[in-house]
Image (cartoon, grey):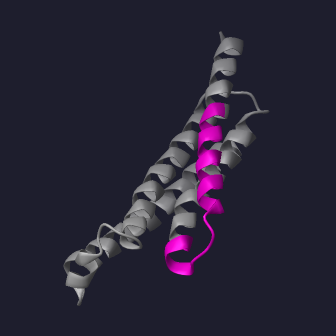
Amino acid sequence: MAFGRKNVSIGLFAMVFFMAYGFLLVFLRDFAPGKEDWIAGYAVHPHFDARLAHVHGNLFALLCVLSGYLIAKLPIGDSLAPWSSWLALAGMLMPLGILGEVYLATPPWPVLVGGASMLLSAVVLATATFRGDQTAG
């Protein structure tokens, strides 16, 4: 199914991005000139938020990949698959929104929309797998 494949692909690209971002954070903490100043602010904004974006970006990317795989492989209805797929993709707004807050001073609404979207994606996918299991059974 095209929806599942899209989620896997975008999720893997997002994972690559947030993993590379994690390497940047390690560099800034351990090797960059002025690392002492970076370490001194490690537990407060914006450094805490940068780590939060890295962790949630990788988690949500993995959830996007998993959602796509399940959409592609499980017998779920065509009516709920697109909803779950698009909601999981919209979930990536959360870590991107955190990055936007840190680097661009954007408002926090993408963080909330992304988190809610990923949660709703899981609810829709759970419902779809339950219904698919009932109809396949």
Closest to the observer: 73 or 39?
39
**The quarter of the displayed image where residue 39 is located:** bottom left
Q: Position of residue 120 (x, y in %)?
A: 65, 39
Q: Is residue 127 visible?
A: yes
Closest to the observer: 60 or 5?
60
Q: Position of residue 111 (x, y in %)?
A: 59, 58
Above or below 86: residue 110:
below
* Residue under the point 57% across and 35% down: 70
| Circle count | 0
Q: Which residues are magenta?
A: 100-123
Left/right of residue 49 with respect to residue 73 in the rendered view: left
Q: Position of residue 134 (x, y in %)?
A: 68, 12
Left/right of residue 109 with respect to residue 38 in the rendered view: right
Left/right of residue 127 with respect to residue 101 in the rendered view: right
Q: Is residue 75 visible?
A: no
Quadrant into which the N terminus falls: top right
Above or below 117: residue 49:
below
* Residue under the point 52% across and 61% down: 95
Residue 7 magenta-highlighted: no
Above or below 10: residue 36:
below
* Residue under the point 49% across and 56% down: 12
